[in-house]
Image (spheres, rainbow, N blue to C red):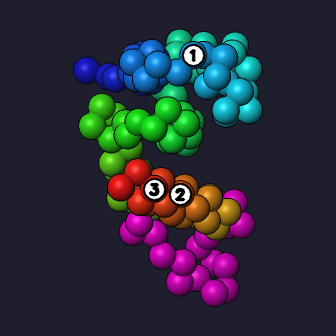
Amino acid sequence: MVQHKGEIVEKAVRESGYSITRLAKKLGKSRRWVYQIFDKPNVPINYIIEIGKAIHHDFSAEIKELNEYKRSVRLQTWDDPEGEFFTEKDKAEYWKNKYLLLLEKYNELLTK
């Protein structure tokens, strides 16, 4: 069975008590954008992480790919000094993901 990620995100947002307006403002997006996310069966992982941080919700239990994504980001290494295997876009994606993981850890420490 394929998960409808938008519905999972919507359920978590509604249970969080955050209004759609407040969430949209916190994310720097429009209310329409938030509703479009709710309608998408395949929401990009980076949006799920961003929304989860905004509402203080960890989607790891509900969305299987999130754990795989986190694991793959942790395992990535960049031993490619000549730039033979990884493009600049790959490297930028790596550092973006590394930043998101660090931000998650930081937020976890703040909640303790």
- In the displayed structure image, the side of residue 95 where residue 12 appears, left or right: left
Name of the residue lying farthest toward the bottom: 81
Dominant secondary structure (helix, strand or loop) of the stretch shown in magenta: loop
Q: Label 3 to label 2, Cα distance in Å?
A: 10 Å
User: x and y percent of residue 62 in the render?
Assistant: 30, 31
Residue identified by numbered label 1: 19
Who comes first in sequence, dot 1 or dot 3? 1
> In the displayed structure, would residue 70 be above or below residue 5?
below
- In the displayed structure image, the side of residue 26 where residue 98 appears, left or right: left
61 is within the stretch colored magenta: no
Who comes first in sequence, dot 3 or dot 2? 2
Task: Determine whether label 3 and label 2 are within 8 Å by CB.
Answer: no
Element under disc 3:
helix
Q: Label 2 to label 1, Cα distance in Å?
A: 23 Å
Residue identified by numbered label 2: 103
Image mark for residue 110 = 3
Tell me what residue is drawn at x 52 percent, y 16 percent.
38
Mark 3 or mark 2, which is nearer to you? 3
User: x and y percent of residue 82 in the render?
Assistant: 67, 86
> In the displayed structure, would residue 46 be above or below residue 81?
above
User: x and y percent of residue 101 in the render?
Assistant: 48, 59
Who comes first in sequence, dot 2 or dot 1? 1
85 is within the stretch colored magenta: yes
- The residue carrying pointer 3 sits among few (fewer than 14), some (14 to 19) or many (20 or more) residues within 10 Å by Cα, namely few
Segment colored magenta? 74-90
- In the displayed structure image, the side of residue 108 where residue 80 appears, left or right: right
> Which residue type carries mark 2?
Leu
